[in-house]
Image (cartoon, rainbow, N blue to C red):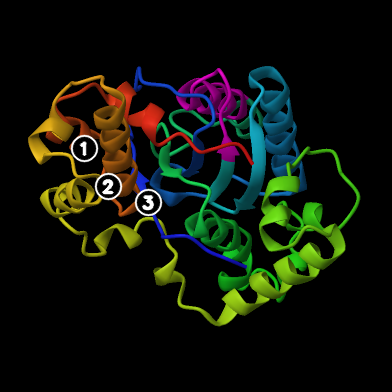
Amino acid sequence: MELFELSIVRVGMMRRSKVHVAGIIFHAYNRGNNRETVFHDDADHTIFLMILEKAREKFDFRLYAFCLMPNHFHLLLEVGEIPLWKIMHWMQLKYAIYYNKRYDHTGHVFQERFKSTICAKNSYFLELLRYIHLNPVRAKLCDDVLDFRWSSAKAYFEPPGDIVVDVKFPLSIFAPDPENARTRLLEFFREGIGIDSNKTDPQKMTAQKLPSLNDILATISRETLINEQTIKSDSRQHPTARARKLFISSAYDRGHHPQAISAYLNCSLSTIYKSIKPTPA
């Protein structure tokens, strides 16, 4: 199985970004306020998953993975026409209303609005898929990835359940044949149990040393034979536009934040997002 270069970028936490591009994959996650428990029993888990499925139907996004831990949750999803912040706001509000009523609770249920990272369809996607599903194993809530009731792991190996998880694309990465792909995916999951979670934790991987944007631009200039300043210009001539898009993709793939690339090129953030939009599976 060929894996591509790892990429990760954190997006805005507390403010609603007006930039939106359909097809972007996000790892969205949040904790209970003050790290308090937000899923106490089966009823809490079930209600949140019902809200998740209603959100999937209402906002038309692809759900690749979910995991509900006692005091936080993880989602791996690909947005459609509705931006991520609207999806997350709707879900968290619905669950907060339920939670506050059931437990006679006042105040915030979740720690912040939510946090998220953008994820390209490459090796980092697979690491996130594994990281999310191994959370309960590493927290010693279960012994095996398939033993945990409140994640999407079983959706990859059993008939579809109440929550619609899009397993086709992730399985296709491992093998064309679904049965072979499932075998290799399970091996991939279980191999990760002995790996230090810090190596795949999205909050800790950003510490990796990045090549500078100047160095990346110089490389693209040599490869395309187009002057660096021309690439940075707003020229719409096809060779220059192609080189600029190649630079944006390369910078993003190596871990540079879209806002940093936008400032470097003096262009809009929407231009950057459109250039890093994943290609269809």
Which region shows up in magenta? 77-97
Question: Label 3 to label 2, Cα distance in Å?
Answer: 11 Å
Q: Is residue 183 left or right of residue 270?
A: right
Q: Which residue is mark 1?
A: 261
The residue drawn where x is 72% and y is 54% is 172
**Label 3–label 2 contact, CB within 8 A:** no
User: Which numbered mark, 3 or 2, is in the foreground of this view?
Assistant: 2
Helix, strand or loop at label 3? It is loop
Residue 123 location (% of width, % of height): 51, 60
Helix, strand or loop at label 2? It is helix
The residue drawn where x is 64% and y is 28% is 61
Q: Earlier in the sequence, mark 3 or mark 1?
A: 3
Pointer 3 local density, CA inside 10 Å: few below 14, some 14–19, many at least 20: many
Q: Amino acid at mark 2?
A: Ala
Question: Label 1 to label 2, Cα distance in Å?
Answer: 7 Å
User: Which numbered mark, 3 or 1, is in the foreground of this view?
Assistant: 1
**Label 1–label 2 contact, CB within 8 A:** yes
Does residue 206 show up?
Answer: yes
Q: Where, quadrant-wise, is the N terminus in this rendering? A: bottom right
Q: Amino acid at mark 3?
A: Ile
Q: Which residue is mark 3?
A: 8
